[in-house]
Image: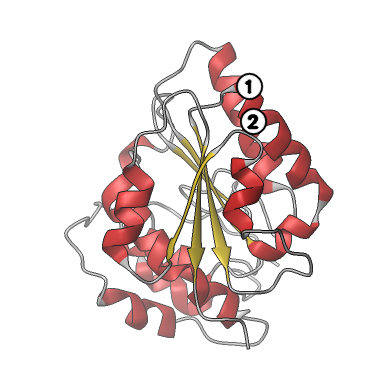
Amino acid sequence: MTNTTATPAASSPRTGTFEDAPRLLALMTGAEKHAPAAHSTLDALWVLYHRVLRVAPATVDDPGRDRFLLSKGHGPMAYYAVLAAHGFFDEALLSGFGSYDSPLGHHPDRLLVPGAEIGSGSLGHGLPLAVGTVLGLRAQGLTDPRVWVLIGDAELDEGSNHEAIAHAGPAGLEQLHTLVIDNASATHGWPGGIASRFASAGWSAVTVDGRDHEALHVAFTAPHPGRPRAVVARVEPKS
C-alpha cells in the first residue's frame, strides 16, 4: 500500500552503466518481491531506457515523448532500478520498496511513480492498452511518438492479448512495439515459437537472446514500415 508520490531526481544520468543495476536491485528487500520476474526483464529494460526510448525525467509530460507501458507489473523491481538509474526518481526510494508509505509498490502506480504510464500487474492488460494508446495518439495527429509495451510470455495465455495482436497487424500500427520476455512460463505454445504468433497476424517479429544487449538493440531499432514490431527476448526458464 502506498500513499506518497515520488519526486523526480534532479538530473537524468544516462551516462550510468549497467554495472549499477545489481546494486540498485539489491536495495529492494522484503517479501513478495517476485524476484525472478524482475530479473528476467532487467537487460531488456536497461537497453530500452539507455539507448532507445525518447523519454527522460524532463519530458515525462511531453506529448511527443515515447511511451513505455510495463504490463508485467507484478515484478517491478528491475523497472524501478532502471528508472532510478536514469534519474526519474532518487535511488534512496528503492530501500523502501513495498512499504506502507513508499510510492514504489508491488505493482507500479502511474500516479505515484514518475515516468510510469500505467498502473499494472494484472495479466493481459498492457498490450490492449498499448494498442489504445497508439490509436489515441493517431487521433491527435501524433504519429512520431513510439509506444512500447513489455509483457511476459504467460500473459499470452490471456485472450485480451490475442485480440490486440489480431487488431494491430491489419491496422498497420507502426508506432506499436511489443517486447515479450520469454522465460518459459506460458501454459500454451505456438508452432514455430511466440514470434510466429505475431508474424501470422501481420507483425514484424523476431526472437533474440534476452541477455545480449547488442542483439536487443538491433532488434529494438530495426525498421518495420507499416507494421507493428514484436521482439521476443528469451531468458533462462523461470525456476
Disc 2 packing (10 Å; few <14; some 14–19; many ≥20): many
Mark 2 falls on what kind of element? helix
Mark 1 falls on what kind of element? helix
Quadrant of the rendering where the N terminus is positioned: bottom right
Can the viewer see residue 87 in this picture?
no
Quadrant of the rendering where the C terminus is positioned: bottom right
Give the percent coordinates (x, y) of residue 185: 69, 73
Can the viewer see residue 163 in this picture?
yes
Judge from the rendering whether residue 9 lies leftward or rightward of residue 4; answer left or right. left
Distance of label 1 from label 2 (alpha carbons): 5 Å
Three-letter code for the amino acid on which mark 2 is drawn: Ala
Tag 1 near tag 2, CB within 8 Å: yes
The residue indicated by pointer 1 is: 171
Give the percent coordinates (x, y) of residue 238: 61, 82
Judge from the rendering whether residue 229 lies leftward or rightward of residue 74; answer left or right. left
The residue indicated by pointer 2 is: 168
Residue drawn 42% across and 79% down?
Answer: 25
